[in-house]
């Protein structure tokens, strides 16, 4: 059945070409968005002004010498009424032809899914529906495949992600989530500009992976004849900028981690990292709540890492092996934290870039904001002691050489930069995908990523 529909549409394309009609013109005239036309409908309809509208045909009702079309652009939808005795032509329907022939060409070759440009005055039908009376019409894109709702729908979740363009056409709520994500980022940028932060960019191709405990993707640079890593985090380069004298900086960009895929994780994701010289973790927690409260309302709570293990997993951290602790926290503790909660005082061995707590060097001045079982923010007072940082990096390097692919690497260039002096600072990373999923009440980060990672077929 689908093959028959495609063949029929291909035939219609050939018909248009035989009529010397270009169904894919480059120059399109549009004078107003559909939403604007509807907003000022009374004024525009009274003036009988000729408007030029464009959009995709969402529905088509053929009633002989009358065709009703639901025309939709990004802003809204309007009914377009084509009458055989009113249509006078278009740039592609040659004006030398008579009206009935122009109407016949459109009638025989239009399909739901095509893009159409129409012009004419606004009016209301006898049923009171706001419409445009079409004087000229032009096919500006001939579609060769039917939209899924016409024959089987698009309900399979994986198919929705694979053919996201169809998902966005058919499910307006999905498109709204993508738009909401964009507005979240825009709001964050505006708020940070008011606070005196500047946005910077750092390398995505790095000679060494670092800044987070995660397995990296590896690629090869042909001209330099060496391997590079897609960054797992921009942290170490942003800290180099602190060394250079920048005091309030942030970056919103893509990170890549060669890890599993689940409701909270996509291998390619958007991270928002911020660094603030002469600030410490408690001040940063207050700033975090101020910045994100508009997205995450309600009372924010606070609990230590050790207390969270006892409360949610019934475990005593002192009786656990270091390699057990992180896994228990992720599997038994984090999923149970629903209300906005700062988890603080993470163990030092889990925090290779955080400053130790002064009266307990086994713990760090680190916090995570967890909401609805998801880590939204990871922040801490930044370690700026080059000797301590070297010791931690050397320990991470030993773990890497012992087979831990997620361990951070020994970065001599970064350590050299620290030796020139980095001011006391606090910083954090916010997962934009997770934040957007939380705000839009999406059950999976894939819902707010335009094209999530999937295994090729």
Image: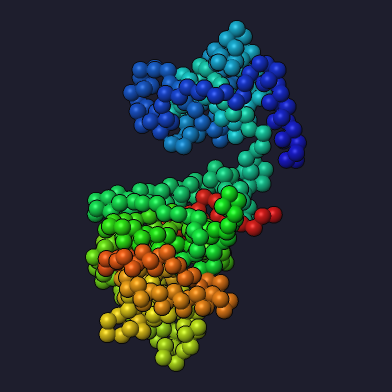
Q: Is 290 situated above or below 23?
A: below
* Left or right position of 300 against 12: left
- Front position in the image: 25 or 90: 25
Using the image, determine if residue 357 lies above or below residue 271.
Answer: below
Q: Residue at x 66, y 37 (%)?
A: 145
Q: Is residue 366 left or right of residue 258?
A: left
Work out whether residue 154 or residue 404 is closer to the camera in this orientation and state it.
Answer: 404
Residue 203 figure quarter: bottom left
Percent x, y for residue 68? 55, 27
Q: Is residue 444 visible?
A: no
Residue at figure coordinates x 67%, y 16% from the top left? 19
Task: Tell me if residue 137 can be seen.
Answer: yes
Q: Give the quarter of the figure containing the N terminus.
A: top right
Q: Position of residue 337 (x, y in %)?
A: 40, 74
The answer to which quarter of the image holds residue 382 is bottom left
* Image: 272 above or below 19: below
Q: Residue furthest bottom?
A: 319
Residue at 67% over, 21% down:
16
Q: Nearer the viewer, residue 352 or 32?
A: 352
Residue name at image x 55 percent, y 15 percent = 91
User: How was the colour assigned to the protein in this rendering?
Assistant: rainbow
| x and y percentages locating residue 295 in the rendered image | 34, 58
Left or right of residue 47, residue 313 in this image: right
Residue 290, position as x, y percentages in the image: 26, 61
């Amino acid at each position: 059945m689908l093959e028959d529909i495609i063949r029929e549409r291909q035939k219609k394309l050939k018909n248009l070409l035989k009529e010397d009609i270009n169904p894919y013109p480059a120059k399109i005239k549009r004078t107003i968005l559909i939403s604007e036309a509807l907003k000022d409908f009374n004024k525009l309809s009274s003036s009988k002004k000729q408007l030029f509208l464009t959009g995709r045909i969402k529905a088509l009702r053929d009633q002989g010498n009358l065709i009703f079309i639901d025309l939709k652009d990004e802003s809204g939808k309007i009914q377009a009424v084509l009458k055989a005795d009113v249509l006078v032509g278009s740039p592609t329907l040659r004006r030398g032809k008579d009206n009935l022939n122009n109407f016949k060409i459109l009638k025989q070759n239009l399909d739901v899914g095509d893009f159409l440009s129409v012009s004419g005055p606004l009016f209301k039908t006898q049923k009171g529906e706001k419409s445009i009376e079409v004087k000229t019409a032009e096919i500006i894109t001939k579609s060769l495949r039917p939209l899924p709702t016409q024959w089987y729908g698009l309900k399979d979740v994986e198919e929705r992600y694979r053919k996201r363009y169809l998902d966005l056409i058919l499910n307006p709520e999905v498109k709204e989530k993508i738009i909401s994500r964009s507005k979240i980022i825009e709001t964050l940028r505006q708020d940070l500009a008011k606070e005196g932060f500047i946005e910077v960019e750092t390398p995505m191709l790095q000679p060494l992976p670092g800044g987070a405990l995660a397995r990296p993707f590896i690629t090869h640079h042909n001209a330099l004849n060496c391997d590079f890593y897609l960054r797992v985090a921009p942290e170490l380069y942003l800290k180099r900028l602190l060394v250079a004298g920048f005091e309030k900086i942030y970056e919103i960009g893509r990170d890549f981690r060669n890890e599993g895929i689940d409701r909270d994780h996509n291998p390619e994701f958007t991270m928002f990292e911020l660094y603030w010289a002469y600030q410490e973790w408690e001040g940063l927690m207050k700033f975090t709540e101020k910045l994100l409260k508009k997205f995450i309302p309600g009372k924010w709570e606070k609990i230590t890492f050790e207390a969270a293990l006892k409360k949610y997993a019934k475990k005593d951290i002192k009786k656990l092996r270091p390699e057990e602790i992180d896994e228990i926290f992720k599997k038994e503790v984090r999923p149970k934290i629903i209300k906005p909660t700062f988890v603080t005082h993470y163990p030092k061995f889990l925090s290779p870039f955080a400053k130790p707590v002064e009266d307990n060097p086994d713990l760090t001045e680190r916090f995570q904001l967890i909401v609805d079982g998801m880590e939204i923010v990871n922040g801490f007072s930044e370690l700026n002691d080059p000797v301590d940082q070297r010791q931690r990096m050397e320990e991470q390097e030993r773990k890497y050489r012992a087979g831990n692919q997620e361990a951070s690497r020994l970065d001599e260039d970064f350590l050299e930069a620290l030796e020139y002096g980095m001011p006391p600072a606090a910083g954090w990373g916010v997962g934009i995908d997770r934040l957007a999923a939380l705000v839009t009440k999406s059950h999976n980060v894939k819902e707010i990523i335009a094209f999530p990672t999937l295994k090729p077929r």
